[in-house]
Image (cartoon, coloured by chain):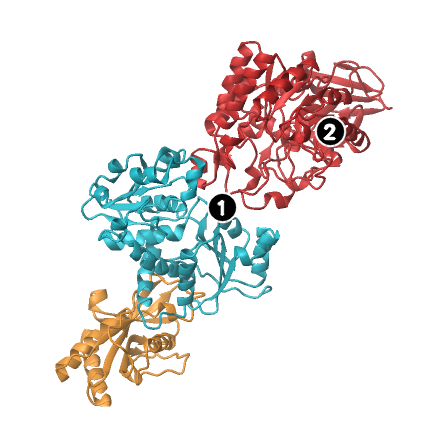
Chain colours: A red, B orange, C cyan
Amino acid sequence: MKSILIQNGHVVDPANQIDGEADVFIQDGKIVKVGKGLKVKADQLINAKGKIVTPGLVDIHVHLREPGFEYKETIASGTLAAVAGGVTSVACMPNTNPPIDDQAIVYFIKSKAEKEGHCHVFPVGCISKRREGAEMSEVGELKKAGAVGLSDDGAPIMNAELMRRVMEYAKMHDLVVIDHCEDMDLSNNGVMNEGHASTVLGLRGIPAASETVMVARNILLAEMTGAKFHVAHMSTAGSVELVRQAKKKGLNVTAETAPHYWSLSDKSIKNYNANFKMNPPLRSEEDVAAIRKALKEGIIDCIATDHAPHSSTEKQCEFDEAAFGIVGLETLFAVTYSHLVEPGVVSLSRAIELLTTAPSKIVGINKGTLSEGVDADVAIFDITTEKKVDVNQFKSKGRNSPFNGWNLRGWCELTIVSGEIKFKSGE
Amino acid sequence: MTSKVKAVVMEAKDIERALTRIAHEILERNKGIKDLVLIGIKSRGEVLAERLAVKIKSIEGTEVPCGALDITFYRDDTDTHQPDKAPEQTELPFDVTGKKVILVDDVLYTGRSARAAIDEIIDFGRPTAIQLAVLVDRGHREFPIHADYVGKNIPSSAKEEVLVRVKERDGKDEVVIAESEK
Amino acid sequence: MTWKSKDLLTLEELSASEIQTILDTASSFKEVSTRSVKKVPALRGRTVVLFFQEPSTRTRVSFELAAKRLSADILNVQTASSSLVKGETLIDTLKTLESMTIDALVVRHKCSGVPLMLANMTNATVINAGDGFHEHPTQGLLDLLTIREQKGKIEGLTVTIIGDITHSRVARSNIHGLQKMGAKVRVCAPTTLMPMGIEKMGVEVYHDLDKALKDTDVVYVLRLQLERQKKNLFPTIREYSILYGVTNERLKRAKKDAIVMHPGPMNRGVEISSGVADGPASVIDEQVTNGVAVRMAVLYLLKGEKTQGENA
């Protein structure tokens, strides 16, 4: 395998406290050295002057849709979208068909990813068999096969007793329990956040309490069981407060949020455009402010996209009938940079941490660093050139982005996965 | 659209005389007022019809029924024409069937308004006759329509406008030729 | 009076002067409905599609009559007879209709926002005949016309809307329309039928009917969807009727000359007593009459450019 030397870039590697101009030397798919003015011979030189060089981003909340929904996305198209966004590791959610509730599906996804994928793929196993929320899946076997966490994502665990048992059992297997926190009864078939905006639009509302109530229940169960519990796509001010208290108590509770929860609110929903429909829904401006504050204060541990591709038929229809979810991999860094770093909510190196080491730690994978000897997963970003988001240029099969047409900075120039260039902008 | 007045072609006295003559002509031709009704086209035709009714009453001593049409819904240019005000109501306080209708308008030009008015009247019933009385005939007909009673023929250019002003609406009785400034 | 917009989707987007124009035009059309030949040729040769994807008799019949009195050709496309039930998407159905060169589409749909979505995808005029819980602009307009006729004005009046505000498109259109025309709007409902953030729409919120009715010029009673009871939005129809049913006794709290309105169909003895519905204050029949006139006015004003052939 050939060697690569990335020269003169601004390297940001929070795990190793690097934040300045340096070179990165890659050989045989591994990081060999990061340092200033490296005197080494390499097969390929990459000039990264004026660019940001980071560990490949890690997104622990992605829907690759395969198997079962290949018309929305495949492992091939989803991982290509990932590397186009500078993401080199994804944890994929188990709401496939069949769902990832036994070893066979884990193996299928891993082998497919190896053959057709463009980045590292870490499956998340189901909490319950067939994602029905009734019986626990074979958690031990899933772990053995390579699942990095447990979730019935898309479907919350309404049965508190099941959640308790899964937490107890997952703890024994050192697996994090990730819950899509939502009380379905409170959501009551709602399609957007309940508040002034839903009242004016005449759309059925999902109250903020529908998420917050479940976060509270799960934190109490995590306290009781001592399990590692992770709040998926946190969106409300109330959840932020609960996680803050849980952390103060020293519980094993972490939380993620997605770029749309700090860059958009329920007031952004215009013309009943279903590309603004996701679950949890875009919340009130007060919630958005709380999410930004939580990112600043470290109450939220990491950023994940909840990349949820859908076909155009599922989105270009009645808002009530449209599928929940938006794509996010290809705009992840640009929205983070332009709407979190540039306004000064977090520093660049903190943003990189939220996108690399922090998520890796939650699911327990050795990713998100440029430490010597690790897989050479590297991303190079241009943070000076402004470019318009154009969904038609997406590598993902999904075009369902609320950010279409936005002018953003922070676009991925080049992505290296295990020492191989997997994406180069303009190619 | 504003207009610059070029000439006053009829003053109040002229209008008065013309209407008196038309009233006499109507009575002469119809041999009295039996079954006669006056229908003005809104808005100035309505005013002129009411004045003719007063004159006829002063000659014959009997009231002639008077109505008014708003022809907006019968126009043939509704695809391109944006009216500058909301349409008004048509008021026909009598049945037109069996009547001799004197249709009254201020200016006869292309004949399209008269066509619309005739169509509208026919939707209300079957008059025995419809006759047309206008204060001014300015030519440039586009339809085979002629006036039975004309106050004054005023040959004009298509670039000009002939404006009839009446006291009741405009504060002053006069007919002017104006340059249209589009 | 120039009419710019291609569609009528909401009262929220209309200005006071545009509403005024529609009401003035509607007044003229009322006269047409009193003629022996109740028809004018204003929309001759136009095709109006009544695209009703939710059961509705009143509104559909009213639009149909309005279009017929304007001499338009009418095509009824309803849920049962449309291909929507066969799984065709809304967009494909729209494209099919559009290929038949239609001029106007009157849309009723159970999902909020559908008329707006369709309007963005077609050159035809789209008229919202009620979408989900969002708006019902022609109902709002006919209500405004009725109030203006009965009271001689709208500005300065106090209008109290009583009932299920959460699920009412009629309430939303009336709130927008009445406020634009200078009326003060109160809403009165149990807390469970009052949507979150409604006060931000500039209305006064009441839960006590007697207080809400005090000094009211117009009492607007909404229809109660009886099946909402199963969703725990009120305990029983009996209790709702006791707390929020408008009776002659309770009407005494309103102004002496107050009028009572209802969009129909009524649940007599639930939200409104027969005594009120048939009493001297009721202008419910007038609302229906004005519905045809308002819809004629809207169809007439929005008729736009005539559809040409595909390549013209």
Residue marked by disc 2:
A414
Q: Residue at x 63, y 44 (%)?
A: A312
Q: Position of residue A327 (x, y in %)?
A: 63, 35
Residue C147 against residue A219 in the figure, above or below? below
The residue located at (67%, 17%) in the rendering is: A170
Residue picked out by circle 1: C113
Instruction: Tell me, yes or no, whether the two marked residues, 1 and 2, touch with CB atoms within 8 Å.
Output: no
Question: Is the residue marked by circle 1 packed among few (<14), some (14-19), or many (20+) residues within 10 Å?
Answer: many
Residue C291 seen in the figure: yes
| Residue A217 locus on image (x, y percent) | 53, 20
Q: Quadrant of the C terminus of chain A?
A: top right
Question: Which chain's residue wears label 1?
Answer: C
Q: For the residues marked 1 and 2, what is the alpha-carbon distance in whole angstroms?
A: 41 Å
Q: Residue C87 placed where, x, y %?
A: 61, 51
Query: In the image, are marks 1 and 2 on the same chain?
Result: no
Q: Amino acid at mark 1?
A: Gly
Front residue of this view, candidates A147 and A169: A169
Residue extending farthest right:
A1
Q: Secondary structure at mark 1?
A: loop
Q: Say which of C249 and A402 sits in front.
A: C249
Mark 2 burial class by Cα count in 10 Å: few <14, some 14-19, many 20+: many
How many discs appear? 2
Q: Which image quarter: residue A129?
A: top right
Amino acid type indicated by mark 2: Leu
Asked whether, in this view, residue A10 is left or right of residue B94, the answer is right
